[in-house]
Structures are given as C-alpha cells and as structure tokens.
Amino acid sequence: MDVNTNGRPLKSHEWVLNDLRKQLEEGRLAVGDRLSSVVDLAAQYGVGRSTIREALSVLKAMGLLDIRQGGGTFVKALPTEPPHPGLLRPEWVGRAESLRHILEVRRVLETGCASLAAVSRTDDDLAALAETLRSMEEHLGDEALSEQADVRFHEQIAAATHNPVLADLMASLSQKLHDSMKDTRALWFYAERSSAERLLREHQAIFDAIRSRQPQEASTRMEQHITKVEQVLGEKGADVPSR
C-alpha cells in the first residue's frame, strides 16, 4: 500500500495525483498536451469522477495544468516557483480537511454574527462594510488585496454586532481566516475572475440583509456563502470540467 511522507496510506486522489505528476515530470505528458476527459481518466484509474477532479484541482493549483471551462485540461510549462507557499509539498493534499474544520467554525460563529449585526449595526458600521465591498470590487483582479478585503469584511460584521466577545473571537481567528482564504483560492480556483465576481455578489447579499435589518436573511445568506465554499472543497471539484 502506498503511503505519504507521514506514513499515512494515500487517499485515492493522492495516488492519482502522484501518477499524473510523475507523467508530467518525466515528459510523458508534454507541454500543450490535452489530458483525457474526467470520465476517461476515472475509467482508466478505476476511481470516481470526484477523485479525478480533486487530483486535477491540486495539479492546477501547482501551476502544472491549465483547466479551461468547457475546453479541456492542458499541460502547462513547469513553474519556476510554486504559486502558493507549500503547494508543491506532498502534505498539501491533506490541507483540505483542515480547511473544512475552519469552515465548520465559521459556520457556527459567522451566521450568528451576521444575524446580530443586522439588529445592532450602526450607520458607521454600514459605511465601513460598504467601503470594503467597494475595495473588493475595485481589486477583483488583485488576489492579495481581494483576500485582505474579504477578511476585513467578515471582521467588520463581527464588530457590527457590538458584542466585544464576538469581536474578540473573530480577531483571534484572523490569521486562520487569512490562511484558509489564501489556501482555498490557491487550491480551488478562487483566483479566477468569474469566481471572484460570484463571491462579491454573495458578500453584497449579506450586506444588503444587514442594511435592511433582516437578521434571519443575513444569517441565511452567510450560511449559503459558507456552504458554497464547502461545496468547492467537496466532491464536485470546482470549475473542473465534468467531461
């Protein structure tokens, strides 16, 4: 049985990933080559399509593949540097699980914050949130600034509750929020403009509910936002072509 560097048995997507990466490194898959479809690769490896999508997701994040929506998956030139710290380390493929754990905490904490913020927010709170949304829109193509605005938006919602305990809890999670958002974007294609625009719309919907003083709607919108992020980490394999 194949194991990783920590002695843990490899998951299906990990050994598919390792095999494809070996083919890329050995030149059996050359720059510009188009990979077989997800359906064909699943049959070739004897695994489910979600397993193939997850392996391709990691290879794309490593900068080894170019996945074109509706156009296929192509081999890219080997990057001179990893696009995200640690992406080329074997342990990267296990990070999705820790991201899911952080999202579970966010679901519990942030849905409550959104609901309370809709009741307790002030005009100053709205102004701060609106300014952050403008920054997110202005910097859709700038990953670093977009990530900073994203984290700031969620922290401002906690501040708008005017509950110092909730604000402190969010502040204590600040670095984990930064890390999780950076990891999620790097691994699951949030850097693509279409995904960035979708995220902006989701944040706008949360803001609208808070502005309208609709606590249940604010909580629901936050729940939907986090659920969509979780779905990207799930079996569907975001933006990976299904055929």
Image (cartoon, rainbow, N blue to C red):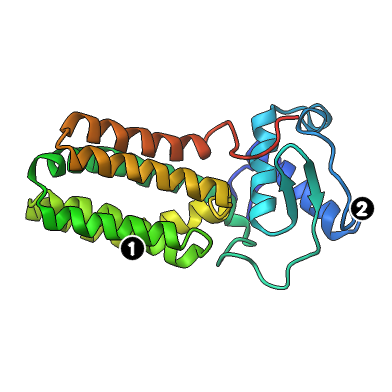
Q: Is residue 105 visible?
A: no
Q: Earlier in the sequence, mark 2 or mark 1?
A: 2
Q: Residue at x 56, y 52 (%)?
A: 193
Q: Is residue 26 visible?
A: yes
Question: Crowdedness of circle 1 by 10 Å Cα count: few (<14), some, many (20+)?
Answer: few
Looking at the image, residue 230 sits to the left or right of residue 74; the answer is left
Residue position for label 1: 175
Question: What distance separates the C-alpha of mark 2 from that of mark 1?
Answer: 41 Å
Q: Residue at x 81, y 63 (%)?
A: 77
Question: Label 2 is placed on what type of residue?
Answer: Arg
Residue 28 point in image, percent of width and height: 92, 53
Looking at the image, residue 27 sits to the left or right of residue 200; the answer is right
Question: Label 1 is placed on what type of residue?
Answer: Gln
**Secondary structure found at label 1:** helix
Evaluate if marks 2 and 1 touch, with contact meaning CB atoms under 8 Å apart. Answer: no
| Picture quadrant of residue 222 | top left
Residue 177 point in image, percent of width and height: 35, 56
Q: Is residue 110 above or below residue 217?
A: below
Question: Crowdedness of circle 2 by 10 Å Cα count: few (<14), some, many (20+)?
Answer: few
Residue position for label 2: 28
**Secondary structure found at label 2:** loop
